[in-house]
């Protein structure tokens, strides 16, 4: 029943995205995957090129880093729900190249209703955001002010969304470790703290 409701919302979002962008990478949106009763939900920023091709979240370079870090922290990927704040690939289009970009504020805002429904349908005990974009998106849904990932990573934030209470646990995005190797240890340590939190709840 829950899966059917979520699939109906995803199909409606597919139609919305197709109307916005037409035939391009962004017409192949990437939706959430995982158990409907997952205790932990990860929320990334938006799909990249590999995700748009495959239709699955976190399968590219950053996704492989993410999987390795989860395994090291003893968090089973198959037991968590994984989605993105924005379901299509935001890109810079040049004459000879197409590259990823951060979603624009209006793109995030338009994606919030679906993210709200994902949270309310899955109802995870813990929501781990990956990077600034999903962190600010979840805080906005809960009526809270935006903060930066650098200020709150690895901390617990209790939130309430339409009567549903959960713990927000902000993390750096796995892609950040590719460009800043020093963050690899930080993210690994934060994931260990996340595993400890899950054992408490």
Image (tube, helix red, strand yellow):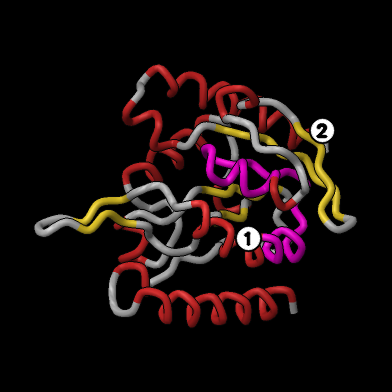
Task: Identify whether 43 is placed above or below 152.
Answer: below
Q: Position of residue 88 (x, y in %)?
A: 43, 64
Task: Judge whether residue 115 is colored magenta.
Answer: no
For the point 72% across and 52% down, the residue is 141
Eye-nearest disc, 1 or 2: 1
- Residue 112, which numbered label? 1
For the point 81% across and 53% down, the residue is 161
- Residue 200, which numbered label? 2
Q: Position of residue 17 (x, y in %)?
A: 45, 74
For the point 28% across and 72% down, the residue is 24
Q: Is residue 185 left or right of residue 23?
A: right
Q: Residues within 10 Å of mark 1 (few under 14, many from 20)?
A: some
* N-term mark: 1 or 2: 1
Instruction: Give the quarter of the figure containing the C terminus.
Output: top right
Task: Identify whether 181 is placed above or below 75.
Answer: above
Task: Judge whether residue 129 is colored magenta.
Answer: yes
- Please give the range of residues in magenta: 116-139
Q: Is residue 144 left or right of residue 29?
A: right
Q: Is residue 112 left or right of residue 104?
A: right
Discs 1, 2 touching: Cβ within 8 Å: no
Tag 2 secondary structure = helix
Say which quarter of the image contains residue 119.
bottom right
Task: Identify whether 143 is placed above or below 74.
Answer: below
Q: Nearer the viewer, residue 170 or 15?
A: 15
Q: Main secondary structure of the magenta part?
A: helix
For the point 77% across and 49% down, the residue is 142
Q: Nearer the viewer, residue 142 or 82?
A: 142
């Amino acid at each position: 029943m829950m899966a059917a409701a979520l699939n109906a919302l995803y199909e409606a979002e597919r139609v919305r995205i197709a109307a916005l962008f037409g035939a391009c990478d962004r017409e192949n949106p990437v939706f959430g995957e995982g158990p409907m009763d997952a205790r932990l939900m990860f929320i990334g920023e938006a799909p990249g090129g590999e995700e748009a091709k495959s239709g699955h979240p976190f399968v590219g370079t950053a996704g492989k880093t993410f999987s390795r870090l989860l395994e090291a922290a003893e968090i089973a990927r198959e037991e968590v729900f994984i989605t993105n704040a924005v379901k299509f690939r935001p890109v810079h289009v040049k004459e000879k190249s197409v590259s990823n970009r951060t979603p624009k504020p209006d793109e995030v805002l338009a994606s919030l209703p679906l993210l709200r429904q994902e949270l309310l349908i899955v109802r995870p005990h813990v929501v781990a955001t990956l990077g600034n974009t999903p962190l600010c998106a979840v805080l906005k849904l809960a009526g809270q002010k935006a903060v930066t990932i650098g200020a709150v990573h690895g901390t617990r934030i209790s939130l309430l969304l339409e009567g549903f209470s959960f713990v927000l646990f902000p993390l750096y995005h796995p892609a950040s470790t590719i460009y800043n190797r020093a963050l690899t240890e930080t993210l690994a340590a934060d994931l260990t703290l996340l595993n400890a939190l899950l054992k408490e709840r």
